[in-house]
Image (cartoon, rainbow, N blue to C red):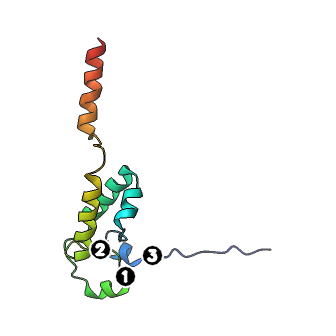
Amino acid sequence: MAEKIKFKKVVKPKKILGLASQIEPKTIAELEAMHTGSLMNRRKALLKCPETSSLSELDKTLPLGDIRFKDTAVWRKAYQDLKSVLDTREHLPSKKERKAMRQQRVRTRR
C-alpha cells in the first residue's frame, strides 16, 4: 500500500514576527502600466509599512531591495512615484461618494 505523505507548512519570518508584507520597488513605467485599483492597493500596502525598524537582525535575513519601512529613502521614492502616477489618473469615488450618487439617481427618477 502507498503511504500517505505529510507536508509541513513553511512559516515565513514576517508571519512569525507579524511584519507587513514586503513591497518590491517598481519603476514609473511599471506603475503607469498598472490598473488604477492596483495602484490604490499598492498605496494601501505602502501606508501599512511600519514607521521604523527596530529589528536589525531581521533586516539581514529578509531579501534586499524590498520596501519594508517608512523611514527609508526607497519607501519615500516609491510613494512619491506612486502619487505622481495617481495624479494623472481618473478619480475613483469613495464609498460615501458612490452612495450619494446612487441616492441622487433615485431622487431624479421619481
Q: Which mark is residue 5?
A: none
To which residue does mark 1 refer?
A: 62
Ranked by sequence position, the earlier of labels 1 and 2 is: 1
Distance in Å between CA atoms under marks 3 and 2 = 18 Å
To which residue does mark 2 refer?
A: 68
Residue at horizontal 36 percent and vertical 82 percent from the top? 64
Q: Is residue 81 above or below residue 98?
A: below
Residue at horizontal 19 percent and vertical 75 percent from the top? 71
Q: Are marks 1 and 3 in contact (CB under 8 Å)?
A: no
Residue at horizontal 40 percent and vertical 52 percent from the top? 35
Please state which amino acid type lies under the numbered disc 3: Val
Q: In x, y percent, where is residue 110?
A: 29, 11
Q: Is residue 103 above or below residue 19?
A: above
Quarter assignment of residue 97? top left
User: What secondary structure is found at the residue carrying circle 1?
Assistant: loop
User: What secondary structure is found at the residue carrying circle 2?
Assistant: loop
Q: In x, y percent, where is residue 102?
A: 29, 27
User: What secondary structure is found at the residue carrying circle 3?
Assistant: loop
Quarter assignment of residue 15? bottom left
To which residue does mark 3 refer?
A: 11
Please state which amino acid type lies under the numbered disc 2: Arg
Q: Is residue 22 above or below residue 83?
A: below
Q: Are marks 1 and 2 in contact (CB under 8 Å)?
A: yes
Q: In x, y percent, where is residue 62?
A: 37, 82
